[in-house]
Image: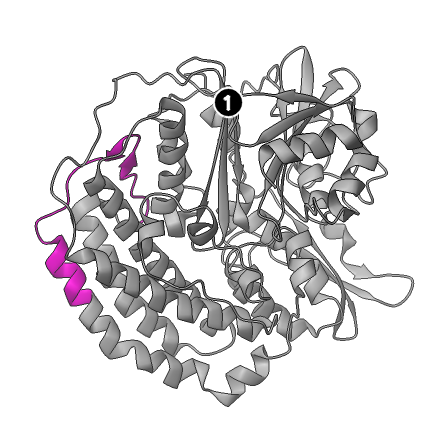
């Protein structure tokens, strides 16, 4: 499907979704609470069939966090970017690790690096950071480490 | 972490493989739950060499951050640099001169061969055959010599820069590459005679670590790990960059889904890389090796994503720019991280001795996973 066709299809599925212009791929903004049902449709709908989650990450915008999901379809060869704005003090979003298995690792990484709480994640533990690491999330913009970080 | 070692209430044994273990080729720590000799669960613990390259890049300029990325997947550092250079060029909308494009593709394919050579030797060594390691390194050494002449380095090249490549090819480059190709063609049959056709080796690889096509996609596998299951995912074919769309080469697919299929994909991929080099080595266009760019690069506000095919799979570079001289946020979607996540799935129910074969054919490079 081309970006225009995708846009029409997604407007049908979720009228509340807003689109971002200018990117290479179609980019949509959604509310975190819409994400789980939409993700299931994305994965299972035959004309969309986004079966390959190739990137999952988060951006700290100082006022809020943004989850970014890059999805692709191996069958149809179309791509989409989904963004969802999270509250910075209490970031929460539903896990999608049961839909795309790769998300289990990626969500654990985002959990420790940004402190995003993935609801219903099967195994939300530290993956990269050492045991006993408390609270501070290294990839947030206000993270300070006077010993290991060198300011240029 | 280590106090987990012992016996569970069901009588299962928990053991550690790593962080320092010869078969992990890096500091990877696996906590394995065993029932007798059968694997019930594999749990990777990461972070022993995590340098937080993504955070580091936030304070480095668009010219500087490329040097750090050589240290991610150090076996395909050219291709890492290439991905970053492409992403910056996408933001700047710079046209890369034809000569630079050909040089880049040549370097990428030489890197791919060198990386697969090392994988082949190291994997055979893990399975107990020491000789292949020396055979593989004999050929790999000549690639390293070629790189050293042109780039000045043998492992972390840092040769690709936004706009092209850092300097022109060494005058000996074409001659040396042709010599290497002759040597390689003379020796390639030894690989099959030594390892591929060996019945002991085949018994250890076939039907070990089966991965279905659907699972490969769901777990985000890419590169030879997914192509061994028949998933067509070669970025060079699907989303061609540089001049890959004008070159003749085949995407290597195997349908077995087991360790042997993944092994065969890499063996056949080396021959495809040779094919690409053969098409280009006599046809390097004259001209500039670098486009003219400003001394201080500033990317416009926005988001840029590039995908390239490294020796291990799909590498994604995601730059979020706020219009300044440094990226606001960078994310590297490394192939190894996703490929590692499938290890638990394919290892369950297998024997402990087969784990090495599975890890070997996933071709894990730890700095790529830890970043």
Residue drawn at 31 percent across, 30 percent down: B162
Where disc 1 sits, the SS reads loop
Q: Please state which of residues A14 and B371 is positioned toward the viewer in this rendering.
A: A14
- Sort mark 1 into few (<14), some (14-19) or many (20+) by Cα contacts within 10 Å: few
Residue drawn at 66 percent across, 66 percent down: B211
Given the current orientation, which residue lies at the most extreme bottom position?
B199
Image position of A131 with respect to B347: above or below: above
Pinpoint residue A126: horizontal percent, then vertical percent: 72, 38
Pinpoint residue B351: horizontal percent, then vertical percent: 70, 75
* Observer able to see residue B230: yes
Residue B54 located left or right of residue A131: left
Residue drawn at 76 percent across, 58 percent down: B5
Residue drawn at 13 percent across, 56 percent down: B174
Residue B176 located left or right of residue B139: left
The structure's colour scheme is: one colour
Queried whether the magenta region covers residue B113, the answer comes back as: no
Queried whether the magenta region covers residue B177, the answer comes back as: yes
Residue B204 located left or right of residue B324: right
Q: Please state which of residues B169 and B127 is positioned toward the viewer in this rendering.
A: B169
Given the current orientation, which residue lies at the most extreme top position?
A63
- Which quarter of the image is occupied by the C terminus of chain A? top left
Query: Which region shows up in magenta?
Result: B155-180
Q: Give the residue pinned by disc 1.
A: A149
* Observer able to see residue B70: no
Pinpoint residue A149: horizontal percent, then vertical percent: 50, 22
Image position of A9 with respect to A22: above or below: below
| Quarter of the image where one finds residue A141 | top right
């Amino acid at each position: 499907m081309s970006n225009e066709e995708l846009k029409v299809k997604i407007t049908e599925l979720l009228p509340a979704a807003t689109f971002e212009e200018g990117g290479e791929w179609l980019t949509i903004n959604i509310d975190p609470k819409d994400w789980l049902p939409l993700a299931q449709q994305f994965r299972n709908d035959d004309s969309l069939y986004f079966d390959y989650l190739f990137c999952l990450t988060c951006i700290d915008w100082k006022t809020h966090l943004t989850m970014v999901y890059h999805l692709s379809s191996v069958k149809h060869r179309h791509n989409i970017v989904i963004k969802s704005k999270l509250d910075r003090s209490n970031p929460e979003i539903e896990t999608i690790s049961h839909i795309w298995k790769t998300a289990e690792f990626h969500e654990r990484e985002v959990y420790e690096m940004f402190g995003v709480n993935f609801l219903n994640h099967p195994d939300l533990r530290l993956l990269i950071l050492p045991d006993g690491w408390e609270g501070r999330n290294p990839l947030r913009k206000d993270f300070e480490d006077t010993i290991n970080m060198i300011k240029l | 972490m280590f106090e987990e070692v012992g016996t569970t209430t069901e009588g299962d044994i928990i053991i550690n493989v790593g962080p320092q273990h010869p078969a992990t080729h890096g500091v990877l720590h696996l906590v394995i739950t065993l029932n007798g000799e059968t694997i019930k669960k594999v749990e990777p613990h990461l972070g022993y060499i995590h340098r937080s390259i993504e955070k580091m890049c936030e304070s480095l300029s668009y010219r500087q951050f490329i040097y750090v990325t050589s240290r991610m997947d150090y076996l395909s550092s050219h291709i890492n640099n290439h991905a970053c250079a492409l992403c910056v060029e996408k933001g700047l909308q710079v046209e890369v001169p034809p000569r630079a494009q050909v040089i880049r593709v040549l370097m990428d394919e030489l890197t791919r061969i060198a990386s697969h050579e090392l994988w082949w030797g190291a994997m055979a060594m893990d399975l107990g055959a020491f000789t292949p390691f020396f055979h593989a390194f004999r050929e790999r050494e000549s690639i390293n010599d070629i790189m050293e002449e042109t780039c000045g380095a043998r492992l972390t090249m840092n040769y690709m820069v936004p706009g092209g490549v850092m300097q022109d090819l060494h005058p000996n480059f074409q001659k040396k590459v042709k010599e290497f190709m002759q040597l390689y063609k003379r020796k390639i049959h030894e690989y099959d005679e030594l390892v591929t056709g060996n019945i002991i080796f085949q018994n250890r690889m076939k039907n070990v670590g089966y991965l279905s096509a659907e699972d490969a996609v769901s777990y985000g596998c890419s590169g030879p790990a997914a192509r061994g299951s028949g998933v067509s995912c070669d970025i060079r074919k699907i989303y061609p960059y540089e001049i890959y769309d004008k070159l003749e080469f085949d995407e290597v697919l195997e349908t077995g889904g087991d360790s042997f299929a993944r092994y065969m994909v890499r063996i056949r991929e080396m021959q495809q890389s040779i094919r690409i080099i053969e098409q280009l080595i006599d046809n390097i266009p004259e001209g500039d090796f670098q486009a003219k760019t400003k001394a201080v690069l500033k990317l416009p506000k926005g988001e840029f994503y590039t995908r390239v095919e490294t020796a291990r799979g799909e590498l994604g570079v995601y730059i979020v720019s706020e219009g300044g001289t440094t990226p606001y946020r960078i994310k590297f979607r490394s192939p190894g991280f996703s490929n590692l996540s499938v290890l638990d799935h394919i290892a369950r129910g297998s024997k402990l001795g087969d784990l090495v074969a599975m890890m070997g054919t996933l071709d894990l490079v730890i700095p790529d996973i830890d970043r």
